[in-house]
Amino acid sequence: MNWKDFRLSFSLLVLCRLLLAVTPYVDSLELDHDHQLSSPTNSYVRLQEGIFLYKHDVDPYSGGAFYHSPLYLSLFTTVLPTSRFLCRLVWTLVDALGAWALVGIWRERQTLESSSRDTLIAAAYLFNPYLFLPNLALSTASFENMLQLLALLFACKGRASPALFFASILLHLSLHSVLLLPPFILLLLSSPHSHLVNPKFFIAYRNPKASLGTALSYIGEFLVYAAIMSLCCTTVAGGWGWVEKTWGVVLTLPDLTPNPGLWWYFFTEMFDHFRPFFLMVFSVHLLMYVAPICLKFQHDPLFASFALLGVLGMFKPYLTLADPGLFLSMYALFPEIYPYLYHPLVTTLLHLHAALLLPLFHSLWLDQGTGNANFFYASTLVFGMANGAAMVDAIWAGLRIAVGGRQGEDEGEIAVVQE
């Protein structure tokens, strides 16, 4: 597909999303109050409350309802609109930019100007229900996903400064994005091309000009950007209280509003004297995946980033559908693993099962009052199993591709393709 054809098809996809966003029926659904689509850290309703308090010279971080970054306060009180209609347009354009970045990552991985899969990849992002439903709910998770993809795109292009700049902004919107910094650095030091078939030590694929000093300079540049963003946040918030109410919230979990994640119910039932220990366990648990995944997929840092996004899409404390949605849309970047997926049908059925149970049990508990918290948490466990199955199967396929899993027609032996 040439560039002109892709521009036309991409414009049509974005137009369809715009029409969906401005449909009057969407407002009647009150999606911005749905706990599956937004959490306390990215809810549009809470963002509006924080903006109202900020405009009336009241510290939005003095209470216990506003957990957004001060960067949102500065944007929505200066540049971005606050009316619901205009916000729907902005959110749709944010998703369009994310889809464009995803297509750009695909092209960098394949070293192509354009390809026949461009429109398919854009559609996999724009029409993924796990992504466009939170977008219709005006969840700020759409901004986080866009920044994630832009940072990956510039890292794939080898443009360190914009990649690290977007990563530093993302850090202030979502603390757990710092876990993706190691594969980002590896990606900047090597290339986004697929080396899953021929895994070797990182040094075999790194840029000849890359060195330990280069990696340290990238880390230093990231820290400088992060420090500048922190000073901007402090200036906007009028103090350092935002740190406890943004970064601190994802570590201490003060708000146990239900969500599709695995944390909230566990800590609802937790005795207070056990709480600090298990908060530490749950937080450190996420750190445990970074080193093994980066070491195992050091030959393909883009795939390592993809795998870590799958981990976050399952174990993030304030989870929404947008978190696993990004991981599932990125499946389109790795068609080479499709023949080696072990249980794609089971994974698909689990997601379909969870997609039915989540809204059903959510309604039974919180709308009709005929159920209880166990109903909804049971559906989140099914959803967690679906996300875990997708993540494990992708990692398994990424490892198995190095050894041909299909038996030869005559020999009946496994064909080893790894050098």
Image (cartoon, rainbow, N blue to C red):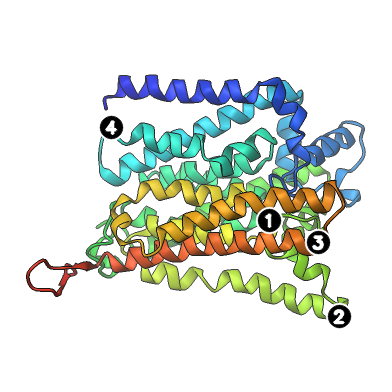
Residue picked out by circle 2: 273
Q: Which of the image's four quarters has the C terminus? A: bottom left
Residue at 25 percent across and 61 percent down: it is 205
**Percent position of residue 59, x then y:** 89, 43
Distance between the Cα atoms at labels 3 and 2? Answer: 22 Å
Mark nearest the camera among 1 and 3 is: 3
Residue picked out by circle 4: 114
Q: Which of the image's four quarters has the N terminus? A: top left
Amino acid identity at mark 1: Pro
- Label 3 Cα crowd, 10 Å radius (few <14 / some 14-19 / many 20+): some
| Above or below: residue 166 compared with residue 122 | below
Distance between the Cα atoms at labels 1 and 4? Answer: 37 Å
Residue 373 is marked as: 3
Toward the front, the furthest residue is 370
Q: Secondary structure at mark 2?
A: helix
Judge left or right: residue 247 versus residue 255: left
Q: Earlier in the sequence, mark 4 or mark 3?
A: 4
Amino acid identity at mark 4: Ser
| Closer to the camera in the image, 100 or 34 | 34
| Closer to the camera in the image, 37 or 196 | 37
**Percent position of residue 290, x then y:** 50, 68
Residue 285 visible in the displayed image:
yes
Q: Earlier in the sequence, mark 1 or mark 4?
A: 4
Q: Earlier in the sequence, mark 3 or mark 2?
A: 2
